[in-house]
Amino acid sequence: MFAQRTWSPAVRRVFPQVVDLVYAVVSVWLSSTALRTWSDPHGYWRHTDVWAYVLIALVYMPLVLRRRAPLTVFIGTVACVLCYFTLAYYHVVVVSGLCLAFYTVAARCPRRVAAKCAAVSLVVLLWGARLAQPGSGLFSVAFVTVMVAVTWVTGDRFRRLAERGERLAVLTEQLRLEQEEKAQRAVIAERMKIARELHDVIAHHVSVISVQTGLADYVFISDPRTARAALKIIAGSAHEAMAEMRRMLVVLREGTERAQEEEDGDHTPAPGLGRLDQLARRVEAAGVPVAVRITGAPFALPPGADLCVYRVIQEALTNVIKHAPTANASVAVHYDEAAVRVRVADDGQATPVATTPGPAGHGLVGMRERAVIYGGTVTAGPGPQGGFEVELMVPVSRDR
């Protein structure tokens, strides 16, 4: 297999040259044989001598280079054929060499160049037609004219097909590059999506676990009941984090493996506004009281938008735990006819997420990326009464 891949391109490059070489050698041999054995009882043509064989060789052997220098080979062939006809040797044996040289020009050179070469070829062949046997002059003229025309049309058609093939190859390469770029963008987008999910899941639950671990350690001896309650919260957060991580892995898998995972795994509902109260209780257990208020007429959101709203609220509350652990937080969700609007606020002195060092895609950047996917917006900044506010708007019509 390796040898085939190594030699195949070299063979494809050399094969046409080998074919041309074989054609030239065989043509010289056949023409020389025909010239030597053709009977001329009436003396129509000049007696064969060494110059006839030299001219035949000069007509056919340069055809080996016709693909590399078609115009140069054509000019040389025309000069040799013209000399051959002028010396009045048996004319038929050199006609195919001139036709092949002209065909190569028509197939590889611009049409205006081929037209000039067609005129030259016709003139030279008409000059050779004078050597035809008496009574066949008109036939020879007609035959030569048709032969030049057919050769020109055939070569021109090959040239156009070759140009079309080159354009197709260029378009195919462009399409391949576009597909690779599209696939690369899709991979990057999927990586960003996974990074956002990992950040939101891990950051929130680890923040809760960190706070509860500190509390459990602080009251482990003085208040065992509180320590046990903190440990239960830690276990619950760890379990939920594992469940959400498992759900992400299921999405990334395919076929029977995914189906088996869904059968063997738990069936906890996917994160969404339906689990907002559970999220609030978990944040309250971490020491940040959360007041949830829902206004408007609630309706079911599409799964993607529902997860987007939930993750933005989760990230906003996680940042309250991180940056304002002594504050009170509130979550207001409003349903209207064309959108869902969310406002997460606290009354502490939270450090703005945008100024917190971290990789791109975290904090407010991650929230905005999520919202943009569904045509929404996220704004954040200090609240009018102090603290920090995050507002989200996701356009979702209830008439779906």
Image: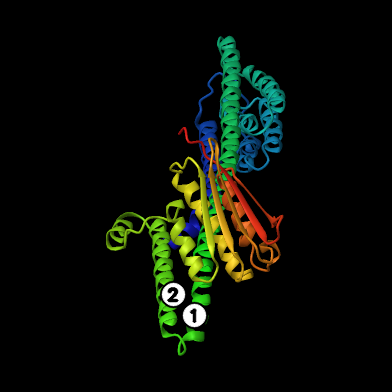
Question: Residue 141 is drawn in which quadrant?
Answer: top right
Q: Is residue 333 shown left or right of residue 126?
A: left
Residue at 28% from the left image edge and 63% from the top image edge: 264
Res. 177 in view: no
- Residue 283 image point, x, y percent: 51, 66
The kind of residue on which mark 2 rests is Ile
- Residue 192 image point, x, y percent: 56, 57
Instruction: Name the residue carrying label 2.
Output: 234
Question: Mark 1 near mark 2, Cβ–Cβ under 8 Å?
Answer: yes
Residue at 43% from the left image edge and 43% from the top image edge: 300
- Residue 313 image point, x, y percent: 54, 56
Mark 2 falls on what kind of element?
helix
Query: Upstream in the sequence, badge 1 or badge 2?
Result: 1
Q: Nearer the viewer, residue 338 or 223?
A: 223
Tag 2: Cα neighbours inside 10 Å, few (<14), some, or many (≥20)? many
Instruction: Name the residue carrying label 1.
Output: 213
